[in-house]
């Protein structure tokens, strides 16, 4: 009997101990709610949303049910504003798993498992596209054309194709990021939702501890009202919880969404932080030290021209960005770009002191020059008002040049596209230029996260008569050339790379500057704005294979000195002697 009494006492003590442990665990992981203001890309477009906190952490979470409505609104009203899209989501919950399901077509899902701390997409690209019958992934963004629909400037041909990607499992738990649930909902860090679903749509979350700001790419640099609100908070150190989470989220995002990770030999960004001695700074509580470490990692270790820190955290000390640029600079890649830009700009200014003309004819050769790929703004309609040589976008300039080159009794036999100082820009403009020169243009893209890939093939209405026919393809009757230099980057590299593969356009100059990934804008959990080379990698295709263009396109006819690029009389003689 004494033994039984003693055993009962031990069991009672154990039960009390377990009860206290469960109580302490429940208190530590208690979910509390606070209503906060969310700014939706405008200081006047606000709504109050419930924000959740787990235990005593100050890391903001959002419920998946609330996110369903908020994400739908942002897709329709911000990301694809002006388009009548049918994007719609439904939330459901079973146990500790929450699911968002597309209701506007095939039921693609986003499954949040709070036990496993994973976010799973049966098809990531299909889940985030604006409508079920849209192209899976597409280089074009302005019109997002349906595969079988004629649009004003572009027509996507039947030769276009796409390959769906693999299931994507984002294992946030392996980074120490906790997904939590209660009887009613599941909850994810707001930053994780932004990095996983918004950034690829050029929209980011900026958090300053008092409000959430959902802002388009570089919006804080152009919207003074939003910036004033965002930076109005008192400067202070981060909490230990925020410092640790921010580092974990940064590693998760870069591991999954940096498109050049493999090329740069990065096994993981946690390893890179360790190898560069930056882990303590990136996970610490001093936001200025963390921003400086991030600046160093991106500038010196990633060192690709698409990656860089844009705006420091509102918690960091004033003038930090200026200090970093003066101390560290913009990295070796930018130092080389600046050096090359000075050489080519000086040579061009010497040849054209009043500025190089966008369209110029030298004897039998037409020269078309622009330094940025800019698509036609929505407010301009070239079907109503014909473009002129002063057009500040590529559509207007190329259409005007086409009208001159193909005019009656035109002397033009050769056409040169001068991209020697072109640093890139909008892919839609690049596709338009490719289509103008090749008759049928194409561009290929691969998502390094999902493995999905696609090639879009396009015709354009180049003569603006409302038809897609042979009258839009008369440039292909000319001898075509493209002038490139190390400054020809991003889209300024994509176009000559595809020209090179086509064998229909001769490259002149020096090897173009590379740049294969589409920019992905990001933020840290404490409000620092930066950008990286994202998961969508541009390519050209040959024999059904996708070829990376990051190394640049080598010229068929080399020019050794920048001065040779802009001596157009001599260049025209070289061109006329090409056999």
Image (cartoon, rainbow, N blue to C red):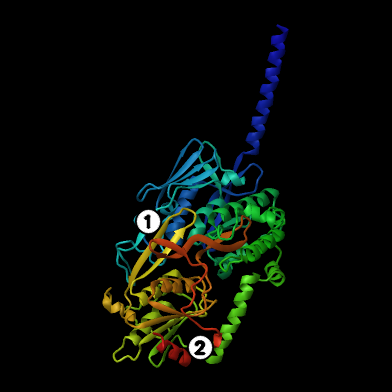
Does the residue at mark 1 contact the one at mark 2 (Cβ under 8 Å)? no
Q: Is residue 400 visible?
A: no
Badge 1 local density, few (<14 within 10 Å), some, or many (20+)?
A: many
Q: Quadrant of the N terminus?
A: top right
Quarter location, residue 465 = bottom left
Q: Position of residue 222 (x, y in %)?
A: 56, 70
Could you tell me residue 380's position as x and y percent?
A: 39, 76
Q: Earlier in the sequence, mark 1 or mark 2?
A: 1
Q: Is residue 547 above or below residue 343?
A: above
Q: Is residue 114 left or right of residue 284?
A: left
Q: Secondary structure at mark 2?
A: helix
Along the viewing direction, whichever of 370 and 364 lies nearer the viewer: 364
Residue 430: x %, y % from top left: 43, 72
Relative to the observer, which residue lies in front, 461 or 19? 461
Q: Residues within 10 Å of mark 2 (few under 14, many from 20)?
A: many
Q: Residue at x 34, y 62 (%)?
A: 160
Which quadrant would residue 466 be assigned to in this image? bottom left
Number of the front mark, 1 or 2: 2
The label shown at residue 131 is 1
Where residue 151 appears, as percent x and y from the top left, is 32, 68
In the depicted view, which residue is nearer to us: 453 or 6? 453
Report the Cα–Cα distance between label 1 and label 2: 47 Å
Is residue 563 left or right of 374 when viewed as pictured?
right
Q: Is residue 91 above or below residue 219?
A: above
Residue 566, label in figure: 2
Q: Secondary structure at mark 1?
A: loop
Q: Which image quarter is the C terminus in? A: bottom left
Give the label on residue 576, or none.
none
């Amino acid at each position: 009997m004494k033994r039984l009494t003693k055993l009962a006492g031990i069991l009672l003590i154990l039960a009390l101990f377990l009860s206290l442990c469960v109580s302490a665990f429940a208190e530590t992981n208690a979910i509390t709610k606070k209503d906060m203001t969310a700014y939706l890309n405008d200081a006047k477009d606000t709504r109050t949303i419930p924000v959740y906190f787990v235990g005593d952490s100050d890391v903001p979470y959002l419920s998946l049910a609330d996110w369903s409505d908020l994400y739908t609104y942002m897709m329709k009203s911000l990301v694809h504003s002006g388009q009548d899209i049918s994007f719609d989501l439904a939330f459901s919950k079973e146990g500790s798993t929450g699911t968002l399901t597309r209701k506007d077509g095939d039921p693609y899902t986003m499954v949040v498992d709070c036990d496993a701390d994973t976010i799973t997409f049966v098809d990531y690209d299909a889940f985030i596209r604006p409508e079920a019958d849209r192209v899976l992934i597409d280089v074009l963004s302005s019109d997002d054309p349906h595969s079988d629909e004629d649009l004003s400037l572009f027509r996507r041909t039947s030769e276009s194709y796409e390959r769906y990607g693999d299931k994507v499992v984002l294992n946030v738990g392996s980074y120490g990021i906790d997904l939590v649930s209660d009887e009613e909902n599941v909850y994810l860090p707001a930053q994780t939702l932004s990095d996983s679903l918004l950034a690829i749509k050029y929209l980011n979350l900026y958090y300053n501890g008092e409000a959430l700001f959902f802002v388009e790419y570089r919006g804080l640099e152009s919207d003074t009202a939003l910036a004033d609100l965002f930076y109005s908070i008192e400067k202070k150190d981060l909490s230990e919880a925020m410092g640790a989470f921010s580092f974990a989220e940064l590693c998760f995002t870069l591991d999954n969404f940096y498109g050049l990770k493999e090329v740069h030999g990065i096994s993981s960004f946690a390893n890179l932080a360790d190898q560069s001695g930056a882990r303590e700074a990136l996970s610490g509580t001093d936001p200025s030290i963390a921003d400086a470490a991030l600046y160093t990692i991106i500038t010196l270790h990633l060192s690709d021209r698409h990656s860089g820190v844009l705006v420091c955290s509102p918690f960091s000390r004033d003038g930090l960005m200026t200090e970093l640029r003066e101390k560290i600079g913009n990295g070796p890649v930018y130092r080389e770009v600046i050096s090359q830009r000075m050489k080519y700009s000086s040579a061009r200014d010497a040849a054209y002191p009043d500025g190089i003309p966008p369209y110029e004819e030298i004897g039998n050769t037409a020269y078309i020059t622009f330094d940025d790929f800019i698509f036609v703004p929505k407010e301009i309609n070239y079907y109503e008002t014909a473009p002129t040589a002063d057009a500040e976008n590529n559509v207007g300039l190329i259409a005007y040049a086409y009208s001159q080159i193909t005019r009656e009794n035109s002397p033009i036999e050769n056409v040169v596209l001068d991209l020697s100082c072109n640093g890139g820009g909008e892919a839609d403009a690049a596709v338009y230029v490719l289509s103008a020169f090749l008759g049928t243009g194409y561009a290929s893209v691969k998502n390094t996260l999902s493995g999905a890939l696609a090639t879009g093939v396009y015709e354009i209405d180049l003569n603006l008569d409302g038809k897609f026919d042979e009258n839009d393809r008369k440039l292909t009757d000319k001898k075509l050339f493209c002038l490139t230099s190390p400054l020809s980057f991003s889209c300024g590299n994509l176009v000559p790379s595809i020209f090179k593969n086509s064998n229909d356009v001769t490259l002149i100059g020096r090897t173009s500057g590379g740049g294969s990934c589409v920019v992905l804008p990001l933020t840290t959990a404490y409000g620092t704005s930066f950008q990286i080379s994202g998961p969508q990698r541009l390519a050209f295709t040959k024999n059904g294979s996708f070829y990376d263009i990051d190394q640049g396109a080598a010229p068929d006819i080399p020019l050794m000195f920048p001065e040779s690029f802009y001596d157009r009389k001599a260049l025209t003689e070289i061109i006329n002697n090409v056999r």
